[in-house]
Amino acid sequence: MAESILIIGKSKTGSSLAEAIRAGGRYKFSGIISARSERFPVIQSDVVIIATKDDAIELVAKKALASALKPPHILVHLAGSLPPTILPERSGMDRLTLHPIQSFAKADPQLLRGIFWMACSKSTVAQHWARRFVAEISGKSTIPLEPEDLPLYHAMTVFSANFITILFSAVEEISTALGQNPKRIKTALRPLSEKALDNALANASHSVLTGPIQRKDLKTIEKHRKALKSLDPKLREIYDAFLRYNLGHGTAKR
C-alpha cells in the first residue's frame, strides 16, 4: 500500500513539492493545506511535511500533531538551518530535516528534478526514507549532515545563491549610474558571468580567478575603489570585503 503524504504550507517550495509528488505517482498524495489555518482538518497521513517559515515550524508541527488521529510515521520540515529536534517528539514517530538545495523564485516542480537534498536525522529509518523519497521525485541524492553542522551548511547555501543575487543588485545600481538599462547590461554580462560560474564549479576556484584581483593590478583596483565610493560607499565595502578575503587565498597564474 502506498505511503500517504500531507504537506502543510503553501510556500513556493511546498507547492512545488506537492506537484512533484502528484506527478510521481509513487505516493498517495493527501493534499496541501495552509499553515495559517487556525485549525487543521483531521490528519491521517503516514508522512507530514511542513513547508513554512522557519519561525513557524514548531507551532505548526504542534497543531498538526494535535489534529492527527495518530502521529505520522515521519514528521519532516524543510528548513536547512534547523535540526529535526525542533519538531515535537512522539513515540513511534521519526523526525527529519530535509532541505532542497535549490532556489524557488516561483513554484515549479521541475526545479526539484536532478537536485541534491540535505538530510538530517538521528534515525536510520528517516535517512533511508529521505533517500528513497528524493529518488522517487526525480532528485539526485541526499547529503546527510549532523545537527550541529546545519548553521554552517545553510550559510554555505546563502553564499552560493542569495549572495549571487545580491551582487547582481549591485550590477543593476551601477548600470543605472552609467545611464544604461540594467536588463540590457545584464544580458551583455551573461556570457562573462556564466563562464566564470562554470569555471568555478568545475575547478578549484582560486585556479580560475581572472582580472585585476588575480593580476594584483593595484592601480586598476584603486580606480575601482574610488569610483565605487563616489557612487555608493556600501558598494566599495562589498568590493573591499572580497579583496580582503582573497588576500588569504592563493591566486592562479595568468
Image (tube, helix red, strand yellow):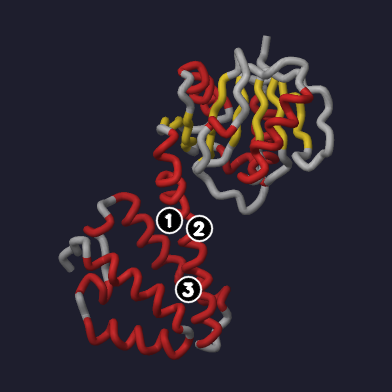
Asked if 102 appears above or below 75 in the picture, the reply is below
Query: In the image, residue 37 lies at what x, y percent?
Result: 82, 39
| Residue for point 66% across, 51% down | 106
Mark 1 sits on what residue?
A: 159
Q: How many numbered discs?
A: 3
Mark 2 sits on what residue?
A: 162
Outermost residue to the top: 1
Query: In the image, residue 38 lies at what x, y percent?
Result: 83, 38
Q: Distance between the residues labelled 3 and 1?
A: 24 Å
Question: What amino acid is at disc 2?
Answer: Asn
Instruction: Tell me which numbered mark, 3 or 1, is placed earlier along the sequence.
Output: 1
Q: Is mark 1 on a helix, strand or loop?
A: helix
Looking at the picture, tell me which residue is in the foreground, 205 or 120: 120
Question: What amino acid is at disc 1?
Answer: Phe
Query: In the image, residue 96 lies at what x, y percent?
Result: 54, 28
Q: What element carries label 3?
A: helix
Mark 3 sits on what residue?
A: 188
Q: Is residue 244 left or right of residue 82?
A: left
